[in-house]
Amino acid sequence: MTQEQMLDELAQMSRGTLDERMGIRVLEASPERVVATMPVEGNTQPFGLLHGGANVVIAESVGSIGANMAAGPGRFAVGLDINATHHRSARSGIVTATATALSIGRTLAAYDVVITDDEGNRTCTARITCMLRDLPKG
C-alpha cells in the first residue's frame, strides 16, 4: 500500500470520530513516525487559547496510529498511558504533532510527541505508551 493510499484509508476511518470533529489531518504515517495537523480555531478554551485537552487528543491520535501500524496484522493497540507538558499557548493557525517511536516491542509501543505552532515553536511535549494486543478470536 502506498503512503497516499494509507492516508486515504486513515481519513476514511476518521469519519464520524473525535479526530474528524477536531479537524485532525494525518500527513505522514509509519510505525516509526506519524505527523498530523489540527486547527486551533474550534479547539480553544474560553480564553481563546488552544485547549490543553486538544493537545492531548492529537498526541493520543498520532501515537495510537503509529502503535496500531506497529502492532501488525491481527493485532491492535490500546492506550495505556499519556502525559503532556504545555510549554506555550497557540491562539490561531494550525498546530503540527509529530510522534516519533521511542520503543516498539511485542507488547508495548511508546512515542514521543512534539507539538509545534505555525512558527515552529514547541507548544507541547507528550509521551504515549500503548499496549499491543491480539485481536479476539472468532
Image: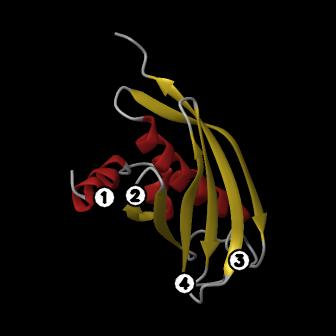
Relative side of 51 to 136, left or right: right
Q: Position of residue 28 (x, y in %)?
A: 39, 64
Q: Position of residue 30 (x, y in %)?
A: 40, 54
Q: Which residue is mark 2?
A: 29
Q: Are marks 2 and 1 in contact (CB under 8 Å)?
A: yes
The residues tagged by marks 3 and 2 sit, at their Cα atoms, a distance apart of 28 Å
> Is tag 4's residue or tag 3's residue first in the polypeptide sequence?
3
Locate residue 128, reporting x and y percent.
65, 48
N-term-proximal mark, 1 vs 3: 1
Between circles 3 and 2, the one closer to the viewer is 2
Give amino acid for label 3: Leu
Characterize the local packing of mark 3: few (<14), some (14-19) or many (20 or more) Cα atoms within 10 angstroms. Answer: some
* First in residue order: circle 2 vs circle 4: 2
CA separation in Å, label 1 and label 3: 29 Å
Q: Looking at the picture, does residue 54 appear above or below residue 95?
A: above
Q: Quadrant of residue 114?
A: bottom right
The image's mark for residue 49 is 3
